[in-house]
Image: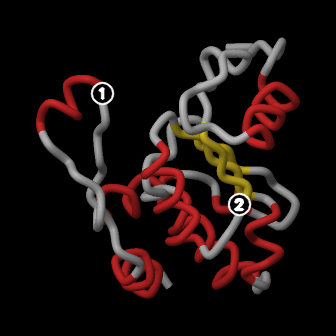
Amino acid sequence: MWHKIKELTDKHGYMSGVDRMSDRVQKTGEIFTPTDLVIQILKEIDINKFAPGKTIIDPTCGDGQFLVPVKWLKVLHFNMTEEDALKDIYGVDIMRDNVDLCKKRLGGGNIFMGNTLAPDIRLDEQTEYEHEQMIEHFAGNTLDI
């Protein structure tokens, strides 16, 4: 199953179409994780954390490098439809091109442009809907760590 998830993840344009210049990396702190490392990390997590109805949120999703294999894990291991798997998956990123590429790689989903650390602040290029979603899902929430 993991080999198939890796194959499907790499098939969907990982790091394609987005300029990854070093000045952009310095400005935004973007780090893109190789597929093999993502698979290794996911293997270490209790697989039941990805069961139907279990919400997965990537607050800095980039182009979806973690979310794409999560989708395929839900589909292949739990026999979910792609549509149902995407209902459980949320991603946020501050870069418009990353958000658009993530949605493309996933085939849809709950992917929004925003800043999870400052969800009330409206970003350039952020849609009104995305801004509303950021406020609804992230404003006023605190994490118990």
Q: Residues within 10 Å of mark 2 (few under 14, many from 20)?
A: many
Rendered location of residue 107, percent (x, y)? 62, 76
Name the image quarter holding residue 121. Answer: top right
The answer to whether 140 is drawn above or below residue 133 in the figure is above
Give residue 29's mark: 1
Name the image quarter holding residue 127. Answer: top right
Tag 2: residue type? Phe
Q: Residues within 10 Å of mark 1 (few under 14, many from 20)?
A: few
Q: Secondary structure at mark 2?
A: helix
Q: Secondary structure at mark 1?
A: loop
Residue at 59% across, 77% down: 72
Q: CA distance from mark 1 to mark 2?
A: 28 Å
Rendered location of residue 89, percent (x, y)? 71, 57
Residue at 22% across, 52% down: 19
Give residue 11's mark: none
Q: Which of 141 and 103 lies nearest the eye of the viewer?
A: 103
Which label sits in the foreground, 1 or 2?
1
Quick check: can you spot residue 101? yes
Residue denoted by label 2: 50
Instruction: Please say if the residues under marks 1 and 2 sit with CB atoms less than 8 Å apart.
Output: no
Quick check: can you spot residue 36? no
Q: Answer with mark 1 or mark 2, whichever residue precedes in sequence.
A: 1
Q: Which of 102 and 46 lies nearest the eye of the viewer?
A: 102
50 to the left or right of 14: right
86 to the left or right of 37: right
- Quadrant in which the C terminus appears: top right
Residue at 11% across, 36% down: 22
Residue at 44% across, 51% down: 98
